[in-house]
Every structure is written in structure tokens, then in C-alpha cells.
Image (spheres, grey):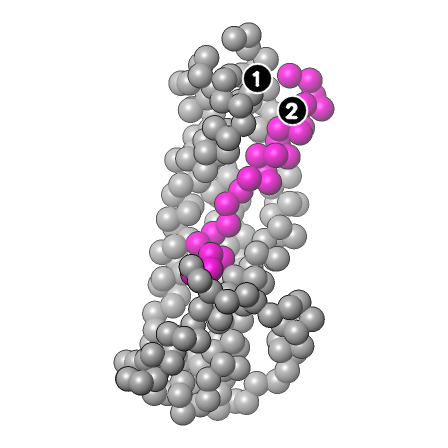
Amino acid sequence: MSRPGARALACLMLAALPLPALAQAPAGAPAAASAPAAAAESAAPLDPAAEAAARDLFEASNVRAVMLAGNEKTLSLMRSGAALSAFVDQNSQMRMKRATNPQAWDAALARLGTKQAAIMAKIVTEMQPEVEARTIRLYAQSFSVADLKAIAAFYRTPLGKRMNEKMPEVLAQTTAWVQAEIPKRIAPAMAELQPEIQRELTPLMSTPN
């Protein structure tokens, strides 16, 4: 494979990085607010009582543990090489090359997956406080103080149902922000992996069928 071709392959594989689980919206979630509207909401000061109640709800609902568990699931897929493997199998040329030497390809993808996961884990860890703060803000903007306190008190009916109606919108807006933020942060961080991708896969792509 030519050097430009290897660079293109590296860029494609970097672009194929899956987002962490905290960025995934639930099925059927409503569309997030537009960027200008979301920015305006983020800039608006929060009522201290609403912010305190929202923070208590965040802790009571165990959202952090759910986020971290989902992130770890995604990172585990990366470490195993499964994330990059799925991308390779979507490309007919790489799929054919892989079939000629599957053991070498699997080993290379596993090595790259470990490095991919390490880079993504650093970014996700750095973003976690921001994700939590944004989620708390959305809670505070979506419910009254009385509602927040009641929901935190073990999701009493009918407020539990009301929470279930609001949560998809809250999660969708958080997801929209994460999905917009990840590409801006991951490109420079993943640049260090590009030489490794070229070193690992260029010989495999150059091997005759």
C-alpha cells in the first residue's frame, strides 16, 4: 500500500471510533434542542434550590454508575479489537486481505484496539465531570424543585411516570452535546495512533492474495 493510501486507511479507522455509551440516546428519544437554543439554556443561571435538588436526584438515581458501566462496556469492545474488527469487515478490500492472514490481522487489531481504548478512556474520563454537570443542569431546567425532591425520594407515582416522560429528552440533549464534543477532542488525541495503524496494517494490505 502506498503511503497516501496508508494515511487514508488510518484516517478512516480513526473516524470509525464508536462513541462511549454515555453518548448513546435511548430509542425513541425526542430530538435535541438546536445548538443556539441549547447554548442559551446552558448560559442561563440556575436557581440554587433547583440545582441542589437536581444534584440530589442525580446521586439518588445512580446515573453515574450507569454511565460508567456503559462506558466500560464500550471500552472493553475496543480493547478486544472488536470495534476496529467490525470496521475492517465493512470494507471489502480489507476484508479480503484479512481473510488471507486472519491471525496476523486479529493480532494487529487487538494491539491497536488496546491503544484505541486507552486514548478513548482518557477522553471519557476528562469529559465525565462535564457530562454530569450538564445532566444536572438539564434536570434542573426540566423539573420543579418540588418534583426533583419527590423523584429523588424513590420515584413516587405519578411523578415517576412524569420522570419517565422527561428523561428521554434530558438524555437526548446530553447525547447531542457529547456527540458534538467528542469529534473535536478525539482528532488531536488519536493522531498519535496513526503511525501505529500504518506500521501494523500497511504490510498486511501489501501482501498478495
Numbered tag placed on residue 205 in the rendering: 1
Dot 1: element: helix
- Amino acid type at circle 1 is Met
Which residue was labeled with disc 2?
A: 6
- The residue drawn where x is 62% and y is 31% is 10
**Which residue in the rendered view is the most extreme toward the top?**
208
- Amino acid type at circle 2 is Ala
Which label's residue is closer to the chain start, 2 or 1? 2
Q: Is residue 48 visible?
A: yes
Quarter of the image for the N terminus: give it.
top right
**Percent position of residue 19, x then y:** 51, 50
- The residue drawn where x is 53% and y is 42% is 17
Please say if 201 is above or below 191: above
Please say if 10 is above or below 30: above
Image quarter of residue 81? top left
Q: Is residue 111 visible?
A: no
How many C-alpha atoms fall within 10 Å of the one at disc 2: few (<14), some, or many (≥20)? Answer: many
Q: Which residues are magenta?
A: 1-26
Magenta stretch holds residue 166: no
How many C-alpha atoms fall within 10 Å of the one at disc 1: few (<14), some, or many (≥20)? Answer: many
Please say if 68 is above or below 10: below
